[in-house]
Amino acid sequence: MSFLFGSRSSKTFKPKKNIPEGSHQYELLKHAEATLGSGNLRQAVMLPEGEDLNEWIAVNTVDFFNQINMLYGTITEFCTETSCPVMSAGPRYEYHWADGTNIKKPIKCSAPKYIDYLMTWVQDQLDDETLFPSKIGVPFPKNFMSVAKTILKRLFRVYAHIYHQHFDSVIQLQEEAHLNTSFKHFIFFVQEFNLIDRRELAPLQDLIEKLGSKDR
């Protein structure tokens, strides 16, 4: 959750997405922060009793967007067209960008360009009231779950790129505890609700198993 970062790093890659104060989603976010503070991440990701699953996934998706935005914001100077000419997660995994609307055929591009496309695309989805309604009583669309799954699948790729290509910089900046906690929270969340296909998680499978085994 964003509170993990305190005020140490206010630099974000894209503007932070705020959940309106006083709204039910804001209350859910506060609940999530309080549970996270207890240190039990497996418990913190569970759907709170009596709450709507779509709303819980929406609130957490916004929060993960903000976290990744912050984490990537801290290393943008190291992720350049020169250092990262392709968007990859180690030598075996390369990602090409397509959003199905503006860019229909996947294009090969540098990591900073890919992440810029990706975060702008996510931001547009989060700002779309028909997809992510913020007002009480406005229903989520029927395809909400598949939209959320695509967003989370793509956000995972930013974690994978940071771990594979920029972990040395993260250590230098003393941000590894933030990165590890944020990623662990993200993974436990997507595992709890089965939101990302196991094959998609392959670039960080060893790390995921390691994080999971510490909690058994």
Image (tube, rainbow, N blue to C red):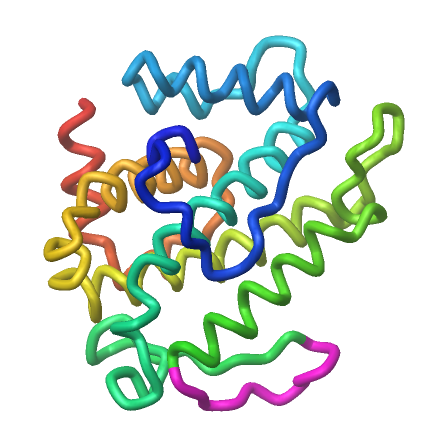
Quarter-of-image position of residue 7: top left
* Residue 125 locus on image (x, y percent): 70, 56
Quadrant in which the N terminus is drawn: top left
Residue drawn at 56 percent across, 86 percent down: 106
Residue drawn at 21 percent across, 74 percent down: 90
Residue drawn at 68 percent across, 30 percent down: 55
Quadrant in which the C terminus is drawn: top left
Q: Taking the image as drawn, is residue 140 in sight?
A: yes
Magenta residues? Answer: 100-110
Q: Which of 182 and 74 is in front in this view?
A: 74
* Residue 48 locus on image (x, y percent): 56, 14
Quarter-of-image position of residue 49: top right
Task: Please give left or right for residue 209 compared with residue 88 in the image.
Answer: left
* Residue 104 locus on image (x, y percent): 67, 85
Q: In this view, does 93 lie above or below 179?
A: below
Is residue 102 in the magenta section? yes
Task: Please give left or right for residue 131 compared with residue 147 in the image.
Answer: right
* Residue 105 locus on image (x, y percent): 62, 89
Residue drawn at 69 percent across, 77 percent down: 100
Task: Please give left or right for residue 141 compared with residue 186 in the image.
Answer: right
For the stretch drawn in magenta, the main secondary structure is loop
Task: Please give left or right for residue 125 compared with residue 207 in the image.
Answer: right
Q: Is residue 145 above or below residue 81?
A: above
Q: Taking the image as drawn, is residue 200 in sight?
A: no
Q: In this view, does 84 lie above or below 41?
A: below
